[in-house]
Amino acid sequence: MKNKKALYLLFAANGISGIAQGISMLAIPWYFTSIINDSETFGLIYAITTIVTLFWGLYAGTLIDRYSRKLVFLSICVVSFILLLGVSLVGFYLGEVPIYLIALVFCFTIFNYNIHYPTLYAFGQEITEKENYGKTNSLIEIIGQLTSIVSGVFAAILLTGVNKDFLNQVGLGFLKFNVNPWQLHEIFLLDALTYVAAFVLILFIKYTPIATHEIDKSSVWNRLIQGFSYLKKHPLLFHFGVSSFAIFVILLIHVHQLMPIYVSKHLHSDSSAYAIGEVVYAFGALIAGAGIRWIFRKTNTIYAIIVLMIISVVRFEILTFSNNILIFMMVSFVLGITNAGARILRITYLFNHIPNHIIGRTGSVFNTVNIFLRFVFIGIFSLPFFHISNHIIWAYFIGGMFILVSIIPLLLYYKKLVHFNISDE
């Protein structure tokens, strides 16, 4: 690989900032669900954030195609550091972080996701040879999930604290140390500082572009129209991109909205089980990153994604009818494999069929559909019904059925997608 050093620096920066970011995104939903017992308010915050992200996601895609991906990353680090440091200092001054600032951090982090990951994949495509797309996407997944594992472990420690009882529960009673639970403003400060390290690493990235990144100086609106127009000319790509996103739509809602409620009100467990569930999920995703292309090496991408979606449907329905924490962990592990595996295969397929200079704009179209669907489901799952007793299980039933329905377009266009070639259209 020609830009191996640049890729390693990019992965390192992504991993460092992702650890503390992951802790923050585990801490905030748990704070609303179990500390202040107000999961409905969090659902409302999440719904509003998601619908606002609809417009930001469209604009973010045009920025990715308009400016240097390195410059976009550096800008993300600077803005993230300033905002998180400011919120943290307010928390230290007041002794706690006001709810509206917690909501601001959550909203900002979701916004960050919507430009960070598309930029990461577009940058990876730009500096990677076409024959190495699958390997690069797998590496991105592996680094991302290693980050999730570390952040999940630290979240379990920082949210719950470490004492004799905790160590006995995890089989480490022979150790003798104590860690008091961290406050949100302390976690936000850690998050802010990691962006400084990421900034320095990205600053040292030097690379020779492999894919042509054509700078388009037209207006934002025209660039958005270009993304829609490209997919209108190639409707099979649109059907594939939207349908194969289904697992990710429900997984994001599961992690940020449903899982803390499920653990607290259905499994009647604590924050350590919630955080460890995220770690187990990340282990599954890590395995997918390392081996999903090998597992499905003898078949095609479309078939592989359909199989992973069917497995996800089954796993979500198991969560509906089980209240066993061990089964919850096993399901989390398998969902890590299916979601990460489908994402790697999906992105590689799109990389092979969409030119780099327009990948950000077409990605904005897919993200817009994704965000709209998440807004609908988040709104539904924020209704009081799902917060009574253990009624959250029905959210998982609905999520599973949505993935099942999303398989239909892939089946209808199966042969065409398998043999799809832009030059043939």
Image: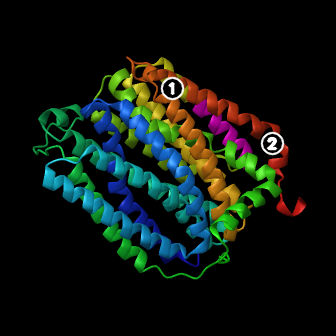
Instruction: Kindly identify which residue carries mark 1.
Output: 395
Quadrant where the C terminus lies? Answer: bottom right
Residue 182 lies, in percent from the top left, at 19, 47
Residue 200 lies, in percent from the top left, at 35, 76
Residue furthest to the right in view is: 424
Q: In this image, 157 relative to 350: left or right?
A: left
How packed mark 1 is, by other alpha carbons closer than 10 Å (few <14, some 14-19, many 20 or more), is: many
Query: Amino acid under label 2?
Result: Tyr
| Residue 322 within the segment the image draws in magenta | no
Give me the residue at 26% from left, 56% from top: 87
Q: Which residues are magenta?
A: 298-314
Could you say which is closer to the camera, residue 69 or residue 294? Answer: 69
How packed mark 2 is, by other alpha carbons closer than 10 Å (few <14, some 14-19, many 20 or more), is: some
Identify the mark nearer the N-term, 2 or 1.
1
- The residues tagged by marks 2 and 1 sit, at their Cα atoms, a distance apart of 29 Å
Query: Amino acid under label 1?
Result: Ala
| Residue 312 within the segment the image draws in magenta | yes
